[in-house]
Image (cartoon, grey):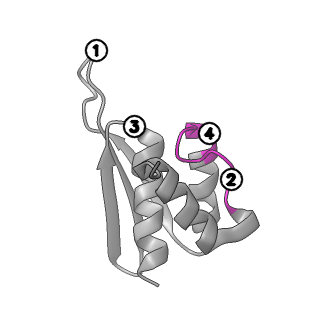
């Protein structure tokens, strides 16, 4: 059985960060925010925006990391996935 996208994402992030990667960050918003904190310690500014703020039923999130005028973002219906995807993009671009 092949790995799901969230499992692959978590595995890749753990490869980049090792023990600094919070467990279950892809599925747990609290752990995902901890992950954002790890990147903030590396000099990034983090922002999470609710793109469906006026909806009572829909959710869609944009996670953005900024550093030195560069902006890296990812969007997903799950806030934790958006954060982890943006974090992966940041780490893989360094």
Say few, some or many: other residues with alpha carbon within 10 Å of mark 4 (under 14 / 14 to 19 / 20 or more).
some
Q: Helix, strand, or loop for circle 3?
A: loop
Residue drawn at 35 percent across, 43 percent down: 49
Mark in front: 2 vs 4: 2
Mark in front: 3 vs 4: 3
Residue drawn at 39 percent across, 49 percent down: 82
Q: Name which of mark 2 and mark 1 comes first in the sequence.
A: 2
- Which portion, as a residue range, is magenta? 21-31
Q: Name which of mark 3 and mark 2 comes first in the sequence.
A: 2
- How many callouts does the rendering have? 4
Using the image, determine if residue 11 lies above or below residue 32: below
Using the image, determine if residue 39 lies above or below residue 62: below
Mark in front: 1 vs 3: 3
Q: Helix, strand, or loop for circle 2?
A: loop
Give the quadrant of residue 77.
top left
Outermost residue toward the bottom?
94
Residue 78's mark?
3
Residue 22's mark?
2
Q: CA distance from mark 2 to mark 1?
A: 30 Å
- What residue is shown with label 1? 56
Residue drawn at 72 percent across, 64 percent down: 20
Say few, some or many: other residues with alpha carbon within 10 Å of mark 2 (under 14 / 14 to 19 / 20 or more).
many
């Amino acid at each position: 059985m092949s790995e799901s996208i969230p499992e692959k994402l978590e595995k890749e992030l753990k490869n980049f960060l090792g023990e600094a990667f919070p467990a279950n960050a892809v599925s747990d918003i609290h752990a995902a925010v901890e992950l954002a904190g790890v990147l903030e310690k590396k000099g990034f500014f983090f922002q999470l925006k609710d793109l469906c703020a006026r909806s009572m039923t829909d959710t869609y999130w944009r996670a953005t990391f900024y550093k030195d005028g560069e902006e890296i973002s990812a969007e997903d219906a799950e806030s934790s996935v958006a954060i982890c995807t943006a974090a992966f993009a940041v780490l893989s671009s360094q």
